[in-house]
Image: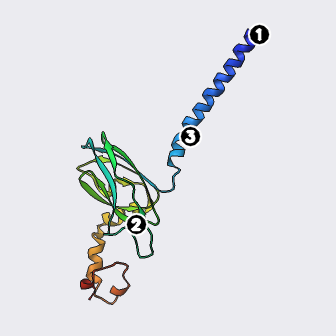
């Protein structure tokens, strides 16, 4: 009888540990199965501060009524942070990390940034297909797209440009 109890206890103990091990291994997968974006960062040169995603334009609503769902700013603790949110479509936003601003082409994807505060730049953010393409385009020497569009806004292609210029610049 004692042998039976010992075997039953061992099987129960192993089963319990196996289930805990499986749940532990699945935890990272469950954490990233979100409907939205995740920005996880480690920034050296800063111990504490905040991270926020801000609209690049002055409003948070586009012409079709789409919205950028912004979370409250999150705290940076020992240089690390995790920010969650959701966008209805890919859009350019400003990522504010402490006192610095970085342009990001944001879509519902997983992003990571790992750099120093001094070297903080949008190209340091990995993840998201469009952000990588955007920074590859800018890095290839194409410069400031808005400035380039402003140069041709008064030509025959100006009315078809997908940018909203103030009325004083359209004429």
The residue singled out by tag 3 in the image is: 26
Q: Nearer the viewer, mark 1 or mark 3?
A: 1
In which quadrant of the rendered view does residue 93 lie? bottom left
Under circle 1, the secondary element is loop
The residue singled out by tag 2 in the image is: 91
Whether residue 94 is visible, yes or no, is: yes
Question: How far apart are labels 1 and 2 at the CA level?
Answer: 68 Å
Residue 16, image x and y in percent? 63, 27
Whether residue 110 is visible, yes or no, is: no
Query: Is residue 112 positioned above or below 152 on the image?
Result: above
Question: How far apart are labels 1 and 3 at the CA level?
Answer: 38 Å
Q: Please tell me which residue is depicted at 34% across the width and 78% down the height of the picture.
A: 163
Q: Nearer the viewer, mark 1 or mark 2?
A: 1
In which quadrant of the rendered view does residue 166 lie? bottom left
Q: Is 10 left, or right, of 79 in this rendering?
A: right
The residue singled out by tag 1 in the image is: 1
Residue 133, image x and y in percent? 40, 63
Query: Is residue 16 positioned above or below 134 on the image?
Result: above
Residue 114 or 38: which is nearer the viewer? 38
Question: How far apart are labels 2 and 3 at the CA level?
Answer: 31 Å
Under circle 2, the secondary element is strand
Q: Residues within 10 Å of mark 3 (few under 14, many from 20)?
A: few
Pick whichever of labels 1 and 3 is earlier in the sequence: 1
Under circle 3, the secondary element is helix
């Amino acid at each position: 009888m004692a042998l039976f109890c010992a075997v039953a206890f061992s099987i129960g103990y192993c089963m319990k540990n196996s289930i805990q091990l499986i749940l532990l291994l699945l935890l990272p997968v469950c954490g990233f199965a979100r409907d939205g974006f995740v920005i996880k960062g480690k920034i050296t040169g800063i111990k504490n501060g905040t991270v926020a995603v801000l609209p690049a334009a002055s409003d948070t609503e586009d012409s079709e009524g789409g919205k950028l769902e912004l979370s409250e700013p999150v705290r940076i603790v020992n240089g690390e942070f995790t920010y969650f949110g959701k966008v209805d479509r890919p859009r350019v936003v400003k990522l504010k990390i402490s006192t610095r601003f970085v342009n990001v082409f944001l879509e519902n994807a997983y992003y990571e940034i790992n750099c120093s505060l001094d070297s903080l730049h949008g190209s340091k953010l990995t993840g998201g297909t469009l952000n990588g393409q955007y920074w590859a385009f800018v890095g290839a020497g194409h410069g400031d797209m808005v400035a380039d569009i402003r140069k041709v806004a008064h030509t025959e292609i100006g009315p078809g440009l997908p940018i909203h210029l103030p009325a004083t610049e359209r004429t």
